[in-house]
Image: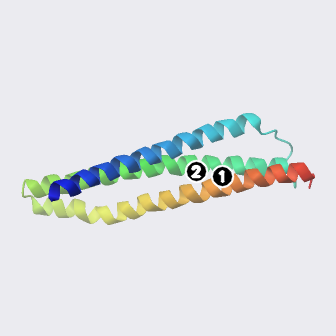
């Protein structure tokens, strides 16, 4: 019974890591595309400024995506240390690493939310810039 749960957990971790990597690759591609297509004008109340804001938001999403992956790696390392020291019966050392895990998990989760929020803000700003440009508002 335990074997199945370990196998499913491994599949979950692999899928989660691949998804984060896919999102990050998509964001870097989107950022590169936006950087080459946006026509910048002086900052003001115009569509170009909104497009620049979208570029900044997507750039922040890229940064938070990298930090999310980095935090997950650190969390997995901490989990490894807890398991390792539990197996060699060094409970004090295992407890030390175990105490650090909840904070690191919250940290990784906050980067997940920040990344997704800035993706949404960036795409909304980009679409808004296109609408503003079409109606010349």
Q: Secondary structure at mark 2?
A: helix
| Few, some or many residues within 10 Å of mark 2 (<14, 14–19, 20+) | many
Query: Quarter holding the C terminus?
Result: bottom right
Q: Which residue is mark 1?
A: 57
What coloring was used for the rendering? rainbow
Furthest-left residue in view? 89
Query: Quarter holding the N terminus?
Result: bottom left
Q: Residue at x 9, y 58 (%)?
A: 90
Furthest-top residue in view? 36
Q: In which quadrant of the rendered view does residue 6 lie? A: bottom left
Q: Secondary structure at mark 1?
A: helix
**Image spot of residue 80 (x, y percent):** 22, 51
Position of residue 115 in the picture relative to residue 99 (left or right): right
Label pair 2/1, CB-CB below 8 angstroms: yes
Q: CA distance from mark 2 to mark 1?
A: 6 Å
Q: Nearer the viewer, residue 102 or 119?
A: 119
Q: Residue at x 20, y 55 (%)?
A: 4
Q: Which residue is mark 2?
A: 61
| Few, some or many residues within 10 Å of mark 1 (<14, 14–19, 20+) | many
Q: Residue at x 45, y 47 (%)?
A: 19
């Amino acid at each position: 019974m335990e074997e199945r749960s370990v196998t499913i957990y491994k599949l979950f971790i692999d899928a989660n890591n691949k998804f984060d990597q896919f999102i990050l690759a998509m964001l870097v591609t989107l950022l590169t595309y936006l950087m080459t297509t946006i026509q910048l004008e002086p900052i003001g109340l115009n569509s170009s400024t909104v497009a620049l804001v979208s570029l900044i938001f997507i750039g922040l999403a890229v940064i938070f995506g990298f930090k999310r992956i980095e935090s997950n790696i650190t969390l997995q390392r901490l989990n490894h240390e807890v398991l390792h020291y539990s197996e060699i019966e060094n409970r004090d050392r295992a407890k030390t690493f175990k105490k650090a895990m909840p904070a690191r998990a919250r940290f990784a989760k906050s980067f997940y939310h920040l990344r997704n929020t800035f993706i949404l803000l960036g795409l909304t700003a980009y679409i808004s810039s296109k609408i503003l440009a079409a109606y010349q508002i």
